[in-house]
Amino acid sequence: MPVVEIAQRGGARTVRLNRPEKRNAINPEMIGLLDEAFSRPPPDDERVTVIEAAGSVFSAGLDLRERDGSAAGVKPFEEMLHAIETYPLPVVAAVQGAAIAGGNELALHCDLVVASRAAKFGMSPSQIGLAPSWFLCKKLQEVAGPVATRRILLLGDPLSAQEIYDLGIISHIAEPDQLAATVEKIVDRLVANAPLSLKAIKSVLVRQMTFRDDIPHADLDAELGRVRESEDAREGIAAVLERRKPKFKSR
């Protein structure tokens, strides 16, 4: 079965992550399919895309077993998220379970996030010897603000959907058995709205965010790269895969 499934119903398109046996961990194949799904111009009759996931977990993040920690390895993931963020029409994330690290970023790069109360959100890289890229940090700070971003990134502990909603990071929250109905209601509202208005609003919102990319950060990219390639990073990933606590040595 494909690791990303795409279906169209009326003006709504559904893009489903489909690796439930791997907690929808994002591997290179999935990145390529998601990038393709959001890099093409939408058809005239499309109004909204919903990103959802099979199983009980939205996404546990990048697949550590297939991880390439180099700058070249990180870039395709960032390009895929950029394609989602800049898609000409609204994108809604339906989060039924845990959205961690790359899964958290995937959800937050959507325009609206609808989460089950059973969901959790978090950025765990600091707990396994990694550090999010400039691109990922700036998105989190944009949606969460400086105080919440520090809490999320420096501590690394997941927050409940209610906590994330109260912080204003996601747009909607629903009881687990009402998630699908809540998403459908939002989708119906978007489909009924004027398509030219939706596209114009998205264009304005995307343009207003582009100034972030002009901030010099080559030195920070280099520092983050050293973290990704450090002994501590290798130890942290090994600890996760071996289900034990990491032993960091600051090198």
Image (tube, grey):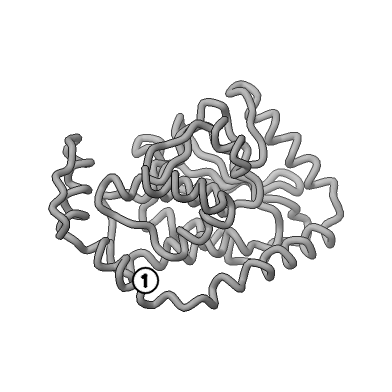
Instruction: Name the residue tied to disc 1.
Output: 220
Q: Dot 1: what SS?
A: helix
Q: Is residue 225 above or below residue 198?
A: below
> Where the N terminus falls, by quadrant?
top left
- Left or right: residue 129 versus residue 58 is left
Residue 2 visible, this orientation: no
Residue at screen point 33% across, 70% down: 71
- Residue 154 horizontal/vertical position (percent): 37, 48
- Left or right: residue 154 versus residue 192 is left
Residue at screen point 73% across, 67% down: 203
- Residue 21 horizontal/vertical position (percent): 35, 35
- Left or right: residue 87 versus residue 200 is left
Total marks in image? 1
- Residue 159 horizontal/vertical position (percent): 47, 35
Residue 102 visible, this orientation: yes
Q: Around disc 1, counting alpha carbons within 10 Å, would you say few (fewer than 14), some (14 to 19), or many (20 or more)? A: few
Q: Is residue 221 above or below residue 96?
A: below
Residue at screen point 67% across, 47% down: 8
- Left or right: residue 27 versus residue 68 is right
Answer with the quarter of the image where residue 162 lies: top right
- Residue 133 horizontal/vertical position (percent): 39, 62
> Where the C terminus falls, by quadrant?
bottom left
Q: Is residue 138 above or below residue 104?
A: below
Residue at screen point 62% across, 23% down: 175
Q: Amino acid at mark 1?
A: Leu
Q: Is residue 104 above or below residue 244?
A: below
